[in-house]
Amino acid sequence: MSNETDEMNLATRCIHAGDTVDSATGAVMPQICTSTTFRQPAFDEPGEHVYARASNPTRDALERCVAALESGVRGLAYASGMAATAGVLELLDAGQHVIAPADIYGGSLRLFKQVRTRTSGLEFSFVDFSDLANVEQAIRPNTRLIWIETPTNPLLNIIDIAAVASLAKANDLLIAVDNTFATPCVQRPLESGCDIVMHSSTKYLGGHSDVLGGLVVVTDDELGQRLASLRSAVGAVAGPFDAYLVLRGIKTLALRMERHQSNALAIARWLAAHPRAERVLYPGLADHPGHALAAQQMAGFGGVVSFVLRGGASAVGPALNALRVFTLAESLGGVESLVGHPATMSHSSLSAAERASLGIPDNLIRLSVGIEHVDDLLADLDRVLGAS
Ligand SMILES: Cc1ncc(COP(=O)(O)O)c(C=O)c1O
C-alpha cells in the first residue's frame, strides 16, 4: 500500500509506508533475511536479489519505508550515519568542493577535514549559514555539493532549508541535509527542493539506543542508482538485523517524537528560568535566533536542548555525575534521556581553538530529552542544579 499511504498522516505512514508486509507469507513484519547470496533462476539471468552487499530483502523493506517517509524515490541503508555521509561524498570527484556550516556534528567535521581532504582530494569551505551571502560567496567553479545540518549539533542553530535549496539549484549544485535531529516527522527537506537527505538512524529512527545505522534518501532515480552502485562497491551496508531494528523503531517514531518534543520544550522553558543556566539553546524558545524559521519549517522543535552551565568548566563534572535519570553517555534520540558534554564527547575531535571559534564553550551541556515522564526529568535536574 505504498502509494496509498502517500496522502496519509505521518503517524500512519510511519507504520505502513513502504508496504513492508511480506507478500510471500503475509508476515506483518518483514523477515530478517540472513542469506548472503541468492539463487539465480538460470544462467546469465540474475534474480531480484543477487548478493547481500548489493541488496537484501530486509534492508529493501527499510529503504522503501524511509524513502516514502522522506518523500523521496529511493532509500539506501548504511552501516552507520558516518558511512551514509561518506557514501554521499563518494558521488564527488577528487578536486571538487563542498560548502558546509562550521557547527555540524563533530564526526562529520572529522570526516570532511581529516579524512576526505586527504584521501579523496576534496575541498571544503565552512561558512556561517545564518547569512546566505556567505554561502553564495563561497561558491567556486569546482563546487558540487552544499551539505547542511539543521538543527545543528550541538548549538541547535536553524538553517533556512528552502532558501539554501534554491541557491543550490540556481548554481546547479547538489544539496544534502543531515536530518538526524529533526526526523521526517518534523521536517522533510526533499519537499523543500533538496536532493539528498541523510540520517544517523542510530538516533531517533532506531530510537532505542540498540542499533547503529545510517540512511540516505534521494529524489532522483539516477542519483539513487549511482549511490547504490557506489555503496555496493565500497560495502558499508546495513546488515539485516540492524535494518530490521530500524524499521521496527520507525513504527513508533511519530509517537516518540511528540513526547521527546513536549518534554524538551518543558525542560528548555524551565532551564531558561533557572539561575544556574547561563544560556539555553533550544529553537522552541522565543528568544532563540532561529525560532521564527524553526516554527515555519519544522513541526515542533526537536528533542535536544543545550545549555551553558553557570560556574564554568569546573562545575560540569559534579553536575553530570550527580544526575540519576539522565544518563551520562554519547548519542541522542533514544527513549531514555541522556546528557552529554560536547567538549569532551561529541566534539572532542576538534581542537579547543576550533570549539571556541564555533561557540562551543567547555561548560556547554547537551541534553537528549527522552520520553520518560517530564516531572521525573525536571526533578532530576532540579535536585542537581539546585545543589551543585
Ligand atoms: C547529526 C549527526 N549526524 C551524523 C551522526 C553520525 O552517525 P553515526 O554515529 O550513526 O555514525 C551523528 C552521531 O551522533 C549525528 O549526531
Image (spheres, rainbow, N blue to C red):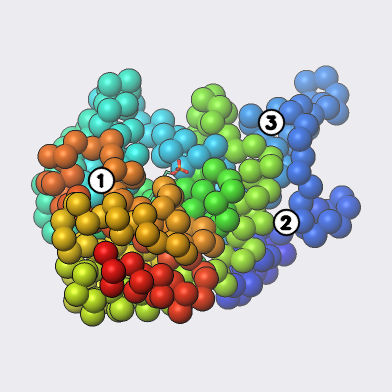
Where residue 278 sits: x, y (%)?
17, 67
Disc 3: CA contacts within 10 A as few (<14), some (14-19) or many (>=20)? many
Looking at this rendering, what residue extends furthest in the right direction? 25
Identify the residue at horizontal 12%, vertical 46% (top origin).
357
Identify the residue at horizontal 32%, vertical 20% (top origin).
119
Which is more foreground, mark 1 or mark 3?
1
Give whichever of discs 3 and 2 has the lower sequence position: 2
CA gap between label 3 and label 2 equals: 18 Å
Where residue 287 sits: x, y (%)?
19, 76
Q: Is residue 183 visible?
A: no
Looking at this rendering, what residue extends furthest in the front direction? 387
Q: Are marks 3 and 2 in contact (CB under 8 Å)?
A: no
Where residue 194 sits: x, y (%)?
37, 55
Q: Which residue is mark 1?
A: 343
Where residue 53 sits: x, y (%)?
64, 29
Q: Which residue is mark 2?
A: 20
Q: Which mark is residue 52?
A: 3
Q: Are marks 2 and 1 in contact (CB under 8 Å)?
A: no
Disc 1: CA contacts within 10 A as few (<14), some (14-19) or many (>=20)? many
CA gap between label 2 and label 1 equals: 41 Å
Q: Amino acid at mark 3?
A: Ala
CA gap between label 1 and label 3 equals: 39 Å
Using the image as rendered, state which of residue 154 and residue 194 is in the foreground.
Answer: 154
Helix, strand or loop status at disc 2: loop
Q: Amino acid at mark 1?
A: Ala
Q: Going by the image, does 129 lie left or right of 303?
A: left
Using the image as rendered, state which of residue 108 and residue 361 is in the foreground.
Answer: 361
Residue 310 figure quarter: bottom left
Q: Amino acid at mark 2?
A: Thr
Give whichever of discs 1 and 3 has the lower sequence position: 3
Identify the residue at horizontal 40%, vertical 75% (top origin).
378
